[in-house]
Image (cartoon, grey):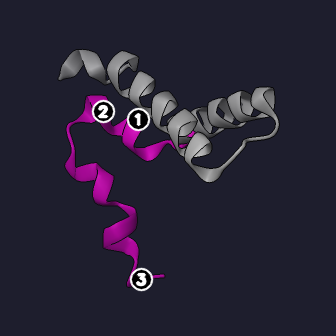
Amino acid sequence: MDKAEADVLAFMAFPKEPRAQIHSINPLERLNGEIKRRTDVVGIFPNEAAIVRLVGAILLDKTTSGPCSAAT
């Protein structure tokens, strides 16, 4: 546990404003939920490439319209 202290508290090196986003896994959980919701709507995929295209489109949409995109 003591060996991992530096890794666990690494987010403290960032400025105070974005620390909550860095520390929280809520954005990741939200993204996983969105991927699950959209894949459940499709149901059965014809091949693996179709899954990759859908998940890629979801990730692209989130990176271009997410809360962090305004800062970039």
User: Which amino acid does the dot numbered 3 rest on?
Assistant: Asp
Q: In this view, does 66 lie above or below 37?
A: above
Residue 8 located within the stretch drawn in magenta:
yes
Q: In this view, does 43 lie to the left or right of 14?
A: right
Residue drawn at the location 28% of the way across and 28% of the way down:
17
Return the disc, 3 or 1, that comes first in the chain's sequence. 3
Q: Give the range drawn in magenta.
A: 1-26
> Which of pointers 3 and 1 indicates the residue nearer the eye?
1
Q: Mark 3 points at which residue?
A: 2
Q: Say which element carries label 2.
A: helix
User: Which amino acid does the dot numbered 2 rest on?
Assistant: Pro
Q: Name the residue under label 1.
A: 21
Q: Mark 2 points at which residue?
A: 18
Q: In this view, does 21 lie above or below 7?
A: above
Residue 20 located within the stretch drawn in magenta:
yes
Query: Cα distance, mark 2 to mark 1?
Result: 5 Å
Return the disc, 2 or 3, that comes first in the chain's sequence. 3
Residues marked 2 and 1 touching at CB (< 8 Å): yes
Q: Say which element carries label 3.
A: loop
Front one among 27 and 58? 58
Residue projecting furthest to the front: 46
Q: In this view, does 47 lie above or below 15?
A: below
